[in-house]
Structure formats: C-alpha cells, structure tokens
C-alpha cells in the first residue's frame, strides 16, 4: 500500500511540473525587445531594455525608466522623469514563471496595496 501511495505522489509531482518550461536563472530577460499585450489591467506596451535603462512605448507615450535587477527573478523600475505623483513611486516586479520566450510577473507600485499580474513576451533579442 505504501508503494502505491508513493508511486502516486511521484506521478502527480512529475506531471504537475510540466506546465512551464523553466529556463535556468540566467540573464535571458535583461536585454532585448519585449511586449505586453493589451488585456486585463494593461494596454499594449512595447519595451526596449538595454543595460540599466528600459524604454516603454504605449499608445502615444514614450517613457524612460531605470531598471535595477536584484536577482534574475526580481527587479525595480523607476521613471527617470516622472510626469505625476504616481510615477514617482518605484515599481517592484517579481517574475513568477519563466517560459522559453516569456514570463509571468506580478507588479507592485510603491508601498501601496496595488498589485497586478501579467505576462511579458520577448519579440526580439
């Protein structure tokens, strides 16, 4: 009976791990061109990352942000020239799942309770 339960637990563990193609914790998403598609809580946004700078283009707006990576799964964005009070707060981004050319993330603005989730896709190296 113990062998059956153990086999069942191992089977469930292995099959549940196939949902995401996990990439090792390298610098895959630190540079390149990315896109956040329009959807719940987001407008279509094109992102260009180089070194410690991120350029975000959405609708008719272009913003430049500084990006600081704490590790391969957490980074902070801050507007270089904030246009309003909300843009003065940093954005804390946690990478939740990594796929081959995309990742799921959670973003929190400043020390507020506001938090939302999304997916970002690499469109060009």
Image: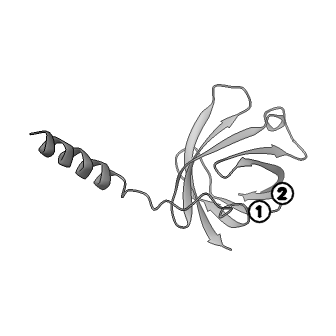
Q: Which residue is mark 2?
A: 53
91 vs 46, nearest the viewer: 91
Q: Which mark is residue 9?
A: none
Q: Are marks 2 and 1 in contact (CB under 8 Å)?
A: yes
Asked which quadrant contains residue 45, the reply is bottom right
How dense is the environment of label 1, judged by Cα within 10 Å: few (below 14), some, or many (20 and up)?
many
Q: Position of residue 68 (x, y in %)?
A: 79, 48
Q: Residue at x 80, y 34 (%)?
A: 89
Comparing 62 with 109, the one in front is 109
> How many numbered marks appear?
2
64 on left or right of 47:
right
Q: Which residue is mark 1?
A: 49
Q: Can residue 60 be seen in the rendering of this structure?
A: no
Q: Is residue 85 left or right of residue 73?
A: right
Q: Residue furthest left?
A: 1
Q: Secondary structure at mark 2?
A: strand
> Residue 85: x and y, percent?
83, 32
- Residue placed farthest to the bottom in the image? 125
Q: Quadrant of the N terminus?
A: top left
The residue lying at 14 percent from left, 45 percent from top is: 3
Picture coordinates of residue 48, whole percent (x, y):
75, 64
Say what secondary structure mark 1 lies in: strand
Look at the image and name its color scheme: one colour
Question: Residue at 87% across / 41% down in the picture?
Answer: 83
Residue 35 position in % (x across, y down): 63, 62
Viewer-proximal residue among 28 and 101: 28
Q: Quadrant of the C terminus?
A: bottom right
Packing grade of label 2 (10 A; few <14, some 14-19, many >=20) is some
Q: Residue 47, can we see it?
A: yes
Up the image or down, 109 lies above or below 18; here it is above
């Amino acid at each position: 009976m113990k062998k059956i339960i153990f086999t069942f637990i191992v089977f469930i563990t292995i099959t549940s791990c196939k949902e995401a193609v996990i990439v090792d914790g390298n610098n895959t998403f630190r540079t390149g061109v990315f896109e956040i598609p329009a959807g719940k809580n987001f407008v279509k946004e094109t992102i260009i990352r180089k070194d410690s700078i991120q350029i975000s283009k959405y609708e008719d707006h272009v913003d430049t942000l500084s990006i600081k990576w704490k590790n391969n799964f957490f980074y902070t964005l801050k507007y270089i020239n904030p246009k309003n009070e909300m843009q003065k707060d940093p954005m804390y981004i946690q990478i939740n799942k990594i796929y081959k050319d995309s990742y799921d993330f959670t973003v929190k603005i400043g020390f507020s309770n506001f938090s939302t989730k999304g997916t970002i896709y690499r469109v060009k190296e």
